Amino acid sequence: MKKRQIDITGRLERVVFHNEESHYTIARFRTDEVDTSIAIVGHLPDARAGARLHLRGCWERHARWGDQFRFTAVVEILPAALEEIRAYLNGGLIPGIGKKGGDLVDHFGTAIFDILDQSPERLAEVKGVGPKTATKIAAAWQAHHAARQLMAFLKENAVSAAHAARLMKYYGDEALAVLKNDPYRVAAEIPLFGFEIADAIVQRSDLAIPADQRAQACLLHLLERAASQGHCYLPQDQLLRLGHQRFDLEEELARSALAALAATHEVVTDTAPGWDSNDPSAPPSPAIYPAFLHHCESRIARQLAALAQLPRVDPPPNGEKLRTLVTRDLAVALADDQLQVLEGVLAQRLAIITGGPGTGKTTLIRSLATVCDAQGQVAALAAPTGRAARLLSIVTGRRADTIHRLLAYSVAEGRFRHDRSDPLDLDILILDEASMLDLPLFYHLLDALPLAARIVLVGDVFQLPSVGPGSVLADLIASGAVSTFQLESVYRQARHSEIVANAHRIRRGEAPALEIPASATTVNLMDGGDFYFLPAEGPAQSAARIVDLCRQQLPECFGLDPLADIQVLTPMHKGEVGTLQLNRALQAALNPPTAGTASAARFRVGDKVLQMRNNYTKEVFNGEVGSVTELDAAEKRTVVVFEGRKVIYEGDETEELSLAYAISIHKSQGSEYPAVVVPLVTQHYVMLQRNLLYTAITRGQRLVVLVGSPKALRIALANDRPMQRRTGLALRLKAAASADAE
């Protein structure tokens, strides 16, 4: 049931908490209606005690803080009486005016606000206010009111005020002018959510935006959203249908807009020559690509086809020489099937090694690098993420880089230094965790490889695909155009692990070998096992069990550090066992506020935090987990330590961080943790997939605990049909291979 919206007016008494980046505010507010103090929460730019405000919102009851008024719209009430205006300007609410407020009121009277808004140059008429001071006062007034004016405009157009902070950050004081004069500029410059703001404003306002301009923006947004879900293209008929369903675009208008986008090279319409219309993986109608993704896909297919045409590499040493070399340098005795794979890979310019946990992928990576050393070849090791690269370095004892670091990304130039004009200096590239490769990253990687170099991709194709668009590893295997070596045997050191054994069962769609007890109280966590299921009734009980496991049971039973050793992995962000609520609950349990620390503060010293995007300047990358070691609220400075390295965040740079007591399974790719706790509830039905569960449990090194519903486990095991990504790479490679064979 929708809560009733009400309006209240009053004065801001005290600011309890204010986030400078998001403008999220908790405050005490004294109402005019009944002259009482209430708690208010919402987004309020430039929150200052003493301001008179008109709020619209609704009452809600917080489990911990009681009744509070959550406002969604706010308008500042400017004083009307002369003495009230004098007090307002002299009260310090507007930085920059200082003691000049009284002089301004004496000169302009009640017209002072109009002067500040419309003719700020006239401030210089006041004695003692020169042109520089007038400019300074005008800028302070504009800065003070820009965000509130923006929020009022967003409210008029039914757009959430929560977007104001990001718009102000991107456009500054010009945000309102941009929205009014060129709203679809926001759609082009701010991914995904920019379009939603722009289109809402266009639909509700009287802005004279040409219909074809809106139609083009709508179609680009649909392609952008598809790419965010992993797709490289949409079939034309689906794109037109979505345009009609979501934005009421008539077919003739949409087709005209599509033609205009093609003419300006923003999209590419492709029937992909060689695609068989009888092939179920071919699109049912022409494929519409964002231009860059089409370029990436086509170029990758051409480069791999050209690579296949090059003469084969020199034959590797025979099997016994390889076995002797690896045994001597690594003290590892290769099994016969491992030796066969090693020989096969060394004979190829491009090869794939894939297999589940415990099948020897790491042993083969080490063996490949050792053989290359012996042959005097330069071998480089890399992985898509920082954590994956560090893990690869640890298990191989060699340097391993992220792809971005290997290609030397330049922040100043916004591009990779290494490309076809300045290729990498290597003979063979061994890339681990290749399931995480997205299409643009693989394109840049191939673009920087020397013509004669070899590349070996190593990964588990059953894991989740990349976060970005494309399904590179799966497409290369499906094409049949790349030599692929599937590892099946689980080796001795992994055979006794219940985690490894159950991972392979789940991969085959079989139930894990464990007893699901009638209740969590009957589970004996001290029986020496490494894989458990704790039943819980519903999300609330699951969340409570997870908090208790992390805070008490696992540290006591296994000697685990709650922060360093235990990682909660969950399928979704929302809900009681999503990342957002679990992080709040785990923060409160594992790192409660100390005396003198604001309980509403976003981070605390000791918090476990996750880097949410690549930051090349700081050399910290998406998915890396660190610990907050210093906080300086006055200086807006936060210090986080990642793997022993101190990184400083200033001001709104902390928007790149989130709490990491619980993270999404997608964010865990390429990482391993001593202990993993995974909630499984039927409320996550849409995300319960076999490869998601498989990815989660293979992150655990010593312990995996599933918490929740046996039914949810059965749903995940039965769902082996994750969303098929729309990509053309496999089909292009098939076509190239067929052409070469003729």
Image (cartoon, grey):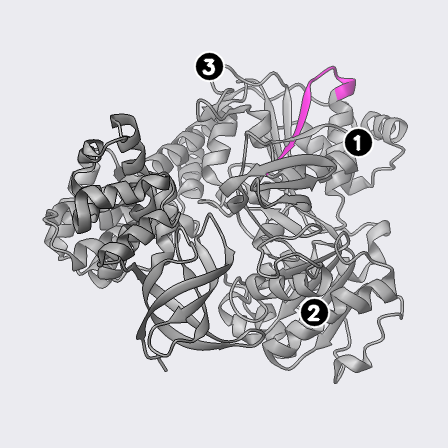
Q: Amino acid at mark 1?
A: Gly
Q: Residues within 10 Å of mark 3 (few under 14, many from 20)?
A: few
Residue 424 badge: none
Q: Amino acid at mark 3?
A: Ser
Would you place residue 584 above or below residue 119 in this image?
below
Residue corresponding to mark 2: 546
Residue 397 badge: 1
Q: Residues within 10 Å of mark 1 (few under 14, many from 20)?
A: few
As helix, strand or loop, the secondary structure at mark 1 comes to loop
Rounded to the nearest angstrom, the CA distance separating label 1 from label 3 is 31 Å
Placement of the N terminus among the 4 image quadrants: bottom left
* Marked residue nearer the N-terminal end (1 or 3): 1
Placement of the C terminus among the 4 image quadrants: top left
Q: Residue at x 56, y 42 (%)?
A: 636
Count of numbered badges drawn on the protein: 3
As helix, strand or loop, the secondary structure at mark 3 comes to loop
